[in-house]
Amino acid sequence: MMRDIILNLLYNLGGKREVERYLREYTQPGAQRTAVVKVGGALIENELEDLASSLAFLKHIGMAPVVVHGAGPQLSRDLEAQGIVSQWVDGLRVTTPEVLQTAHRMFLREGARLAEGIDAQGVRARMIPSGVFEAEPDDPERLGLVGKVSRVDLAPVKAALEAGYLPVLSPMGVTADGQLLNVNADTAARALAEAIRPGKVIFLTETGGILGQDGKVISAVNLEEDREHLISSGAVTGGMARKLIEIGELLEMLPAQASVSITKPEHLARELFTHKGSGTLVRRGAAIQVHNGLKNLDLTRLKGLLESSFGRELRDTYFGEVMKAEVLIAPYTACAIVIDDEPASYLDKFAVTAEAQGAGIGASVWNKLVARHPRLFWRSRTDNPINGWYMQRADGMERTDRWLIFWRGLDTSVEVEKAIERALSYEPSFGAVLKPEEVPVAV
Protein backbone atom coordinates (compact mmCIF):
# COMPACT_ATOMS: atom_id res chain seq x y z
CA MET A 1 0.00 0.00 0.00
CA MET A 2 2.73 2.49 1.01
CA ARG A 3 4.77 1.63 -2.10
CA ASP A 4 1.74 2.27 -4.33
CA ILE A 5 1.19 5.67 -2.75
CA ILE A 6 4.85 6.57 -3.23
CA LEU A 7 4.80 5.41 -6.86
CA ASN A 8 1.84 7.66 -7.58
CA LEU A 9 3.75 10.58 -6.08
CA LEU A 10 6.81 9.71 -8.17
CA TYR A 11 4.76 9.65 -11.37
CA ASN A 12 3.77 13.24 -10.58
CA LEU A 13 7.46 14.21 -10.46
CA GLY A 14 8.43 12.65 -13.79
CA GLY A 15 7.04 10.54 -16.58
CA LYS A 16 6.03 7.00 -15.78
CA ARG A 17 8.60 5.65 -18.21
CA GLU A 18 11.55 7.44 -16.60
CA VAL A 19 10.41 6.62 -13.05
CA GLU A 20 10.09 2.93 -13.85
CA ARG A 21 13.46 2.94 -15.60
CA TYR A 22 15.15 4.18 -12.41
CA LEU A 23 13.11 1.83 -10.24
CA ARG A 24 14.46 -1.11 -12.23
CA GLU A 25 17.99 0.21 -11.84
CA TYR A 26 17.81 0.86 -8.10
CA THR A 27 15.77 -2.11 -6.89
CA GLN A 28 17.29 -5.09 -8.69
CA PRO A 29 18.57 -7.86 -6.38
CA GLY A 30 22.07 -7.87 -4.90
CA ALA A 31 24.50 -5.12 -4.02
CA GLN A 32 23.08 -2.95 -6.83
CA ARG A 33 19.95 -2.54 -4.69
CA THR A 34 21.97 -1.27 -1.75
CA ALA A 35 22.61 2.45 -1.37
CA VAL A 36 25.26 3.85 0.96
CA VAL A 37 23.96 7.17 2.30
CA LYS A 38 26.19 9.73 4.03
CA VAL A 39 24.24 12.18 6.22
CA GLY A 40 25.75 15.40 7.53
CA GLY A 41 25.32 16.20 11.19
CA ALA A 42 23.73 19.57 10.42
CA LEU A 43 20.79 17.75 8.79
CA ILE A 44 20.13 15.75 11.97
CA GLU A 45 20.27 19.01 13.88
CA ASN A 46 18.13 21.17 11.60
CA GLU A 47 16.09 18.95 9.23
CA LEU A 48 15.50 15.69 11.08
CA GLU A 49 11.94 15.10 9.89
CA ASP A 50 12.74 15.69 6.19
CA LEU A 51 15.90 13.62 6.55
CA ALA A 52 14.14 10.67 8.20
CA SER A 53 11.33 10.85 5.65
CA SER A 54 13.77 10.72 2.71
CA LEU A 55 15.59 7.71 4.17
CA ALA A 56 12.31 5.90 4.86
CA PHE A 57 11.30 6.66 1.27
CA LEU A 58 14.31 4.71 -0.03
CA LYS A 59 13.26 1.71 2.02
CA HIS A 60 9.61 1.93 0.96
CA ILE A 61 10.41 1.86 -2.77
CA GLY A 62 12.53 -1.28 -2.43
CA MET A 63 16.07 -0.01 -2.01
CA ALA A 64 18.31 -1.12 0.86
CA PRO A 65 19.87 2.05 2.32
CA VAL A 66 22.78 1.87 4.77
CA VAL A 67 23.36 5.20 6.52
CA VAL A 68 26.57 6.68 7.91
CA HIS A 69 25.96 9.87 9.86
CA GLY A 70 28.23 12.68 10.90
CA ALA A 71 27.74 15.13 13.75
CA GLY A 72 30.37 17.81 13.41
CA PRO A 73 28.28 20.82 14.50
CA GLN A 74 26.92 18.97 17.55
CA LEU A 75 30.40 17.90 18.61
CA SER A 76 31.75 21.44 18.25
CA ARG A 77 28.92 22.78 20.39
CA ASP A 78 29.34 20.11 23.09
CA LEU A 79 33.09 20.69 23.27
CA GLU A 80 32.61 24.46 23.49
CA ALA A 81 30.14 23.98 26.35
CA GLN A 82 32.84 22.05 28.21
CA GLY A 83 35.45 24.72 27.53
CA ILE A 84 37.42 22.46 25.18
CA VAL A 85 38.91 24.30 22.22
CA SER A 86 38.88 22.32 18.95
CA GLN A 87 42.12 22.17 17.01
CA TRP A 88 42.27 21.20 13.34
CA VAL A 89 45.02 19.72 11.17
CA ASP A 90 44.47 19.17 7.43
CA GLY A 91 40.71 19.49 7.92
CA LEU A 92 40.56 16.85 10.66
CA ARG A 93 39.70 17.53 14.30
CA VAL A 94 42.57 16.71 16.68
CA THR A 95 41.08 14.11 19.00
CA THR A 96 42.33 14.05 22.58
CA PRO A 97 40.96 11.52 25.10
CA GLU A 98 38.52 14.21 26.28
CA VAL A 99 37.37 14.95 22.74
CA LEU A 100 36.97 11.22 22.04
CA GLN A 101 34.84 10.70 25.13
CA THR A 102 32.55 13.57 24.12
CA ALA A 103 32.45 12.37 20.49
CA HIS A 104 31.48 8.83 21.52
CA ARG A 105 28.67 10.08 23.77
CA MET A 106 27.48 12.51 21.13
CA PHE A 107 27.49 9.91 18.31
CA LEU A 108 25.36 7.60 20.48
CA ARG A 109 22.90 10.42 21.08
CA GLU A 110 22.68 11.67 17.47
CA GLY A 111 22.57 8.16 16.00
CA ALA A 112 19.68 7.35 18.32
CA ARG A 113 17.87 10.56 17.29
CA LEU A 114 18.18 9.65 13.62
CA ALA A 115 17.07 6.04 14.20
CA GLU A 116 14.05 7.21 16.21
CA GLY A 117 13.17 9.70 13.46
CA ILE A 118 13.21 6.92 10.87
CA ASP A 119 11.11 4.70 13.14
CA ALA A 120 8.54 7.50 13.31
CA GLN A 121 8.25 7.29 9.49
CA GLY A 122 7.15 3.66 9.68
CA VAL A 123 10.51 2.05 8.91
CA ARG A 124 12.46 0.10 11.50
CA ALA A 125 16.00 1.42 11.97
CA ARG A 126 18.84 -0.28 13.81
CA MET A 127 21.59 1.84 15.28
CA ILE A 128 25.10 0.33 14.96
CA PRO A 129 27.36 2.62 17.02
CA SER A 130 30.59 0.67 16.51
CA GLY A 131 31.99 -2.68 15.42
CA VAL A 132 31.84 -2.12 11.66
CA PHE A 133 34.98 -0.03 11.10
CA GLU A 134 38.24 -1.59 12.23
CA ALA A 135 40.76 1.23 12.33
CA GLU A 136 44.31 2.12 13.18
CA PRO A 137 45.70 5.46 14.34
CA ASP A 138 46.17 7.82 11.42
CA ASP A 139 48.89 10.16 12.73
CA PRO A 140 48.90 9.98 16.56
CA GLU A 141 51.49 12.73 17.06
CA ARG A 142 49.57 15.29 15.00
CA LEU A 143 45.95 14.06 15.20
CA GLY A 144 45.70 12.13 18.45
CA LEU A 145 42.96 9.48 18.48
CA VAL A 146 41.89 9.89 14.87
CA GLY A 147 41.58 6.64 12.95
CA LYS A 148 41.86 5.49 9.36
CA VAL A 149 39.77 2.51 8.37
CA SER A 150 41.78 -0.66 7.82
CA ARG A 151 38.94 -3.16 7.48
CA VAL A 152 35.13 -3.15 7.30
CA ASP A 153 33.14 -5.88 9.03
CA LEU A 154 29.87 -6.11 7.14
CA ALA A 155 28.35 -8.81 9.38
CA PRO A 156 26.37 -6.38 11.59
CA VAL A 157 25.15 -4.50 8.50
CA LYS A 158 24.06 -7.66 6.69
CA ALA A 159 22.31 -8.95 9.80
CA ALA A 160 20.33 -5.72 10.12
CA LEU A 161 19.36 -5.72 6.43
CA GLU A 162 18.31 -9.37 6.46
CA ALA A 163 16.11 -8.69 9.49
CA GLY A 164 14.39 -5.87 7.61
CA TYR A 165 16.05 -2.98 9.42
CA LEU A 166 17.61 0.19 8.03
CA PRO A 167 21.16 0.30 9.50
CA VAL A 168 22.38 3.60 10.97
CA LEU A 169 26.16 3.63 11.51
CA SER A 170 28.25 6.03 13.57
CA PRO A 171 31.78 6.77 12.32
CA MET A 172 33.60 5.26 15.29
CA GLY A 173 36.53 2.96 14.60
CA VAL A 174 37.93 0.28 16.86
CA THR A 175 41.51 -0.97 16.82
CA ALA A 176 42.39 -4.66 16.99
CA ASP A 177 43.02 -4.27 20.74
CA GLY A 178 39.71 -2.45 21.41
CA GLN A 179 40.72 1.23 21.41
CA LEU A 180 37.99 3.54 20.06
CA LEU A 181 39.08 6.02 17.38
CA ASN A 182 37.32 9.01 15.83
CA VAL A 183 36.89 8.44 12.07
CA ASN A 184 35.87 11.17 9.65
CA ALA A 185 32.32 10.42 8.49
CA ASP A 186 33.13 10.91 4.79
CA THR A 187 36.08 8.53 5.18
CA ALA A 188 33.85 5.97 6.90
CA ALA A 189 31.18 6.24 4.19
CA ARG A 190 33.79 5.75 1.48
CA ALA A 191 35.24 2.67 3.20
CA LEU A 192 31.74 1.23 3.61
CA ALA A 193 30.94 1.83 -0.06
CA GLU A 194 34.17 0.17 -1.17
CA ALA A 195 33.28 -2.87 0.96
CA ILE A 196 29.64 -3.15 -0.17
CA ARG A 197 30.23 -1.99 -3.79
CA PRO A 198 26.70 -0.60 -4.19
CA GLY A 199 25.17 0.77 -7.36
CA LYS A 200 24.38 4.06 -5.64
CA VAL A 201 26.11 6.33 -3.12
CA ILE A 202 24.14 9.31 -1.83
CA PHE A 203 25.44 12.35 0.06
CA LEU A 204 22.62 14.27 1.74
CA THR A 205 23.81 17.80 2.45
CA GLU A 206 22.52 21.28 3.18
CA THR A 207 24.12 22.67 -0.01
CA GLY A 208 22.20 20.17 -2.15
CA GLY A 209 25.00 19.43 -4.62
CA ILE A 210 28.41 20.42 -5.90
CA LEU A 211 28.44 24.19 -6.28
CA GLY A 212 30.13 26.06 -9.08
CA GLN A 213 31.96 29.32 -8.51
CA ASP A 214 28.69 31.12 -9.19
CA GLY A 215 27.09 29.36 -6.20
CA LYS A 216 24.72 27.33 -8.37
CA VAL A 217 24.40 23.55 -8.22
CA ILE A 218 26.10 21.70 -11.09
CA SER A 219 23.43 19.22 -12.16
CA ALA A 220 25.62 16.45 -13.58
CA VAL A 221 29.29 15.60 -13.95
CA ASN A 222 30.72 13.15 -16.47
CA LEU A 223 34.11 12.59 -14.81
CA GLU A 224 35.76 11.28 -17.95
CA GLU A 225 35.10 14.54 -19.77
CA ASP A 226 34.28 17.17 -17.14
CA ARG A 227 36.49 16.75 -14.06
CA GLU A 228 39.71 18.22 -15.40
CA HIS A 229 37.93 21.12 -17.11
CA LEU A 230 35.80 22.01 -14.08
CA ILE A 231 38.84 22.18 -11.80
CA SER A 232 41.40 23.72 -14.18
CA SER A 233 38.95 26.41 -15.36
CA GLY A 234 38.13 27.41 -11.78
CA ALA A 235 34.46 26.54 -12.22
CA VAL A 236 34.81 24.35 -9.11
CA THR A 237 37.28 25.37 -6.40
CA GLY A 238 38.33 24.70 -2.82
CA GLY A 239 36.31 22.18 -0.85
CA MET A 240 34.01 21.47 -3.79
CA ALA A 241 37.01 20.59 -5.99
CA ARG A 242 38.33 18.25 -3.27
CA LYS A 243 34.89 16.65 -3.00
CA LEU A 244 34.82 16.06 -6.77
CA ILE A 245 38.29 14.47 -6.70
CA GLU A 246 37.30 12.23 -3.76
CA ILE A 247 34.11 11.12 -5.52
CA GLY A 248 36.14 10.24 -8.60
CA GLU A 249 38.49 8.13 -6.50
CA LEU A 250 35.50 6.42 -4.87
CA LEU A 251 33.82 5.61 -8.19
CA GLU A 252 37.06 4.00 -9.41
CA MET A 253 36.55 1.40 -6.66
CA LEU A 254 32.88 0.70 -7.48
CA PRO A 255 31.13 -1.11 -10.34
CA ALA A 256 31.33 0.71 -13.68
CA GLN A 257 27.61 1.60 -13.63
CA ALA A 258 27.70 3.03 -10.08
CA SER A 259 26.90 6.69 -9.51
CA VAL A 260 27.00 9.28 -6.73
CA SER A 261 24.15 11.71 -6.05
CA ILE A 262 24.51 14.79 -3.86
CA THR A 263 21.25 16.48 -2.93
CA LYS A 264 19.04 17.79 -0.14
CA PRO A 265 16.72 15.39 1.70
CA GLU A 266 13.58 17.07 0.35
CA HIS A 267 14.88 16.78 -3.22
CA LEU A 268 15.97 13.14 -3.05
CA ALA A 269 13.03 11.63 -4.97
CA ARG A 270 13.38 14.12 -7.83
CA GLU A 271 17.15 13.60 -7.99
CA LEU A 272 16.89 9.80 -8.14
CA PHE A 273 13.80 9.28 -10.28
CA THR A 274 13.70 12.03 -12.91
CA HIS A 275 16.08 12.72 -15.78
CA LYS A 276 16.25 16.40 -14.82
CA GLY A 277 17.15 15.62 -11.21
CA SER A 278 17.63 18.09 -8.38
CA GLY A 279 21.19 17.98 -7.13
CA THR A 280 24.46 16.76 -8.61
CA LEU A 281 24.75 13.36 -10.29
CA VAL A 282 28.33 12.14 -10.73
CA ARG A 283 29.24 9.20 -12.95
CA ARG A 284 32.50 7.94 -14.37
CA GLY A 285 30.91 8.75 -17.71
CA ALA A 286 32.28 8.09 -21.15
CA ALA A 287 34.88 9.79 -23.29
CA ILE A 288 33.44 11.80 -26.17
CA GLN A 289 34.82 10.36 -29.41
CA VAL A 290 35.41 12.50 -32.51
CA HIS A 291 34.99 10.88 -35.94
CA ASN A 292 35.80 12.55 -39.24
CA GLY A 293 33.00 10.94 -41.21
CA LEU A 294 30.53 8.16 -40.48
CA LYS A 295 32.39 5.24 -42.03
CA ASN A 296 33.62 3.79 -38.72
CA LEU A 297 30.28 4.15 -36.91
CA ASP A 298 27.52 1.59 -36.40
CA LEU A 299 24.84 3.28 -38.50
CA THR A 300 22.07 1.04 -37.19
CA ARG A 301 22.79 2.15 -33.62
CA LEU A 302 23.27 5.75 -34.71
CA LYS A 303 19.89 5.68 -36.44
CA GLY A 304 18.34 4.29 -33.24
CA LEU A 305 19.88 7.14 -31.24
CA LEU A 306 18.59 9.80 -33.64
CA GLU A 307 15.07 8.37 -33.89
CA SER A 308 14.90 7.80 -30.14
CA SER A 309 15.90 11.40 -29.46
CA PHE A 310 13.70 13.09 -32.09
CA GLY A 311 10.75 10.68 -32.05
CA ARG A 312 10.61 10.77 -35.85
CA GLU A 313 11.54 8.39 -38.65
CA LEU A 314 14.93 9.17 -40.22
CA ARG A 315 14.99 9.40 -44.02
CA ASP A 316 16.81 6.48 -45.71
CA THR A 317 19.07 8.85 -47.66
CA TYR A 318 20.25 10.87 -44.65
CA PHE A 319 23.50 9.09 -43.83
CA GLY A 320 24.63 9.24 -47.45
CA GLU A 321 24.17 13.01 -47.40
CA VAL A 322 26.30 13.54 -44.26
CA MET A 323 28.83 10.71 -44.70
CA LYS A 324 31.78 13.16 -44.49
CA ALA A 325 30.44 15.14 -41.51
CA GLU A 326 32.25 15.34 -38.19
CA VAL A 327 30.57 13.32 -35.44
CA LEU A 328 31.11 13.83 -31.71
CA ILE A 329 29.63 10.86 -29.90
CA ALA A 330 29.32 9.37 -26.43
CA PRO A 331 28.83 5.81 -27.63
CA TYR A 332 25.27 5.80 -28.91
CA THR A 333 23.71 7.79 -26.08
CA ALA A 334 24.49 11.32 -27.31
CA CYS A 335 25.97 12.80 -30.48
CA ALA A 336 26.50 15.96 -32.50
CA ILE A 337 26.77 15.83 -36.31
CA VAL A 338 28.57 18.87 -37.73
CA ILE A 339 28.83 19.92 -41.38
CA ASP A 340 31.58 22.22 -42.70
CA ASP A 341 29.60 25.14 -44.13
CA GLU A 342 29.67 28.91 -44.57
CA PRO A 343 29.87 31.24 -42.74
CA ALA A 344 30.56 28.77 -39.92
CA SER A 345 30.10 25.14 -38.90
CA TYR A 346 26.52 23.89 -39.19
CA LEU A 347 25.21 21.70 -36.36
CA ASP A 348 22.99 19.36 -38.34
CA LYS A 349 21.98 17.08 -35.45
CA PHE A 350 22.29 17.22 -31.68
CA ALA A 351 20.76 14.06 -30.23
CA VAL A 352 20.71 12.98 -26.60
CA THR A 353 18.74 10.14 -25.02
CA ALA A 354 16.70 11.02 -21.94
CA GLU A 355 18.95 8.88 -19.76
CA ALA A 356 22.06 10.63 -21.09
CA GLN A 357 20.45 13.99 -20.31
CA GLY A 358 20.00 12.86 -16.71
CA ALA A 359 23.64 11.73 -16.54
CA GLY A 360 24.96 15.02 -17.94
CA ILE A 361 26.45 13.37 -21.03
CA GLY A 362 24.58 15.67 -23.40
CA ALA A 363 26.13 18.69 -21.70
CA SER A 364 29.57 17.08 -22.06
CA VAL A 365 29.05 16.58 -25.80
CA TRP A 366 27.88 20.19 -26.12
CA ASN A 367 30.91 21.55 -24.24
CA LYS A 368 33.28 19.64 -26.50
CA LEU A 369 31.31 20.71 -29.56
CA VAL A 370 31.56 24.44 -28.87
CA ALA A 371 35.23 24.12 -27.89
CA ARG A 372 35.92 22.62 -31.33
CA HIS A 373 33.48 24.87 -33.20
CA PRO A 374 33.27 28.31 -31.53
CA ARG A 375 31.55 29.65 -34.67
CA LEU A 376 28.38 27.63 -35.05
CA PHE A 377 24.80 27.84 -36.32
CA TRP A 378 21.89 25.41 -36.25
CA ARG A 379 18.12 25.17 -36.55
CA SER A 380 15.39 23.58 -34.46
CA ARG A 381 11.68 22.99 -34.93
CA THR A 382 9.57 25.64 -33.21
CA ASP A 383 8.00 23.02 -30.95
CA ASN A 384 11.29 21.47 -29.84
CA PRO A 385 11.15 21.28 -26.00
CA ILE A 386 14.87 22.10 -25.64
CA ASN A 387 14.67 25.43 -27.47
CA GLY A 388 14.95 27.21 -24.14
CA TRP A 389 18.19 25.31 -23.48
CA TYR A 390 19.47 26.36 -26.91
CA MET A 391 18.55 29.99 -26.23
CA GLN A 392 20.78 30.00 -23.16
CA ARG A 393 23.74 28.90 -25.32
CA ALA A 394 23.17 30.99 -28.43
CA ASP A 395 24.18 34.57 -29.18
CA GLY A 396 21.05 35.10 -31.25
CA MET A 397 17.94 33.54 -32.80
CA GLU A 398 15.66 34.11 -35.78
CA ARG A 399 12.14 32.63 -35.97
CA THR A 400 10.26 31.42 -39.03
CA ASP A 401 6.91 29.63 -39.15
CA ARG A 402 8.62 26.24 -38.97
CA TRP A 403 12.11 26.78 -37.62
CA LEU A 404 14.17 28.63 -35.05
CA ILE A 405 17.68 29.41 -36.33
CA PHE A 406 20.35 29.85 -33.66
CA TRP A 407 23.94 31.05 -33.90
CA ARG A 408 26.98 31.77 -31.76
CA GLY A 409 30.36 33.31 -32.49
CA LEU A 410 29.26 35.15 -35.66
CA ASP A 411 30.73 38.63 -35.93
CA THR A 412 28.61 40.58 -38.41
CA SER A 413 25.02 40.91 -39.55
CA VAL A 414 26.14 39.70 -42.99
CA GLU A 415 27.36 36.45 -41.44
CA VAL A 416 24.12 36.05 -39.49
CA GLU A 417 22.04 36.57 -42.64
CA LYS A 418 24.15 34.03 -44.50
CA ALA A 419 23.79 31.52 -41.66
CA ILE A 420 20.00 31.89 -41.65
CA GLU A 421 19.90 31.41 -45.42
CA ARG A 422 22.09 28.29 -45.25
CA ALA A 423 20.15 26.80 -42.31
CA LEU A 424 16.86 27.15 -44.18
CA SER A 425 18.32 25.56 -47.31
CA TYR A 426 18.71 22.09 -45.77
CA GLU A 427 16.03 19.52 -46.49
CA PRO A 428 14.32 18.02 -43.41
CA SER A 429 16.07 14.83 -42.24
CA PHE A 430 13.06 13.26 -40.57
CA GLY A 431 9.71 12.09 -41.82
CA ALA A 432 6.64 11.06 -39.89
CA VAL A 433 6.31 11.23 -36.12
CA LEU A 434 6.78 7.76 -34.65
CA LYS A 435 4.16 6.24 -32.39
CA PRO A 436 5.43 5.65 -28.82
CA GLU A 437 5.68 1.90 -29.43
CA GLU A 438 7.68 2.55 -32.62
CA VAL A 439 10.34 4.73 -31.01
CA PRO A 440 13.53 2.62 -30.76
CA VAL A 441 15.48 2.29 -27.54
CA ALA A 442 18.99 3.61 -28.12
CA VAL A 443 21.57 0.95 -27.22
Image: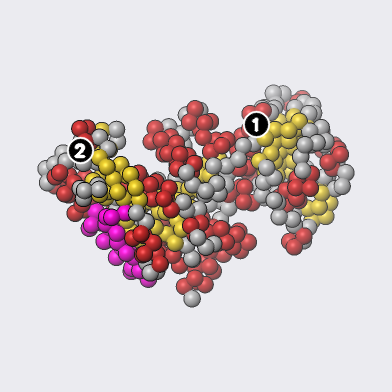
Nearer to me, 327 or 426: 327
Classify mark 1: helix, strand or loop. helix
Classify mark 2: helix, strand or loop. loop
Task: Check disc 1 and give the amino acid type.
Answer: Val
Q: Residue at x 57, y 35 (%)?
A: 225
Q: Position of residue 167 (x, y in %)?
A: 35, 61
Please say whether residue 259 is visible from this viewpoint: yes
Q: Residue at x 69, y 23 (%)?
A: 411
Q: Residue at x 57, y 61 (%)?
A: 24
Q: Position of residue 351 (x, y in %)?
A: 70, 44
Q: Residue at x 28, y 55 (%)?
A: 131
Q: Position of residue 32 (x, y in %)?
A: 51, 57
What numbered label is drawn on residue 144?
2
Task: Check disc 2 and give the amino acid type.
Answer: Gly
Between discs 2 and 1, the one toward the N terminus: 2
What numbered label is drawn on residue 401?
none
The correct choice, above or below, for 370 with respect to 193 in the image is above
In the visual, does 428 lie left or right of 397? right
In the visual, does 5 lie left or right of 117? right
Q: Is residue 108 magenta?
A: yes
Q: Is residue 68 magenta?
A: no
Nearer to me, 385 or 175: 175
Q: Determine the image quadrant of residue 245.
A: top left
> Alpha-carbon neighbours of circle 2 within 10 Å: few (<14), some, or many (≥20)?
some
* Residue that label 1 marks: 370
Q: What's the magenta region?
A: 107-132
